Amino acid sequence: MKKTLIVLMVALLIPAAVFAGRGAFDLIIGAVAKYNYGLGEMIDEVKAGTDPSPFLKLDNYQFGPELRIRLAIVEIDAGALMNTNGSGAKEFYKTFDYSGYGNVGLSFDLLGFIRLGVTAGLDFAYKPTNPEGQQFIIGPSTVGDTKRQTLIASMEGGAGNMANWALTAPINVRATVDFLLGDAITLGVNAVLPTNLSIAAISDGEAWKAAYKDATTNWKATQVGIYLGFNLI
């Protein structure tokens, strides 16, 4: 009987120790930096022994704030990014691009200091240098991507038709690996993979198959970034 109780207690304690984290609720505000180019291009540059200077230039990154809200294992991420497009300090306001994203998903704490998460959501971009009527467009993960022109064409009304925009915009999938440094600081990396799946087509089995095929062939478009956040609760 005692052995049975001991085994039961161990069986209960091990998962609790493995998944122990900060608690049931987190409110984290921080800053994110995302490299402008895809993972495939980064790997090619490393293999070719390219001068590391592209990775050191601030012009090759987007910067902005990111808010994370976590209840139990459900996580909501929302952020905004700015891209200088290589402009100088005196003319930055003329060439800045603005983008944002909102994702919902799950995250799990491991060993008390590692948090793994997967979320999905929508992104968008505002490009003031574009012609009038084309300034608010699909997010940076789809700009200039001919594979997703069908979705772009279906976004009639643009920002003036937000319901249609939300239903037809392509979904991004975001993976995060964070290190919980005490109760206050979160330091991590993230990777964002664009897909050609929209909310309107989420119940379409063929659309899922096409999205999976696209993801396996288009993984090089994945963009990576780093995050530093501070837990407010």
Image (spheres, grey):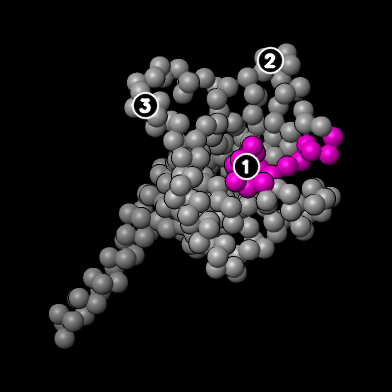
Is 137 displayed left or right of 207 in the figure? right
* Residue tagged 3: 46
**Amino acid type shown at disc 1:** Thr
- Give the Cα distance between marks 1 and 2: 33 Å
Specify whether residue 136 is painted magenta.
yes
Q: Is residue 77 or residue 147 the one in the foreground?
A: 147
Front of the two marks 1 and 2: 1
Front of the two marks 1 and 3: 1
Question: Residue at the spot x=77%, y=28% of the render?
Answer: 129
Residue 60 location, quadrant = top right
Few, some or many residues within 10 Å of mark 2 (<14, 14–19, 20+): few
**Amino acid type shown at disc 2:** Ala
Whether the residues at callouts 1 and 2 have beta carbons within 8 Å, the answer is no
- Disc 3 element: helix
- Comes first in the chain, label 3 or label 2: 3
- Comes first in the chain, label 1 or label 3: 3
Task: Point out residue 53 in the picture as x, y percentages from the top left corner.
Answer: 45, 17
- Disc 2 element: loop
- Comes first in the chain, label 1 or label 2: 2
Few, some or many residues within 10 Å of mark 1 (<14, 14–19, 20+): few
* Residue tagged 2: 89
Q: Which residues are magenta?
A: 132-149
- Disc 1 element: helix
Question: Residue at the spot x=63%, y=63% of the render?
Answer: 201
Is 170 displayed left or right of 45 in the figure? right
Question: Residue at the spot x=65%, y=39% of the render?
Answer: 143
* Residue tagged 1: 146
Q: Above or below — where is 40 with respect to 214?
A: above
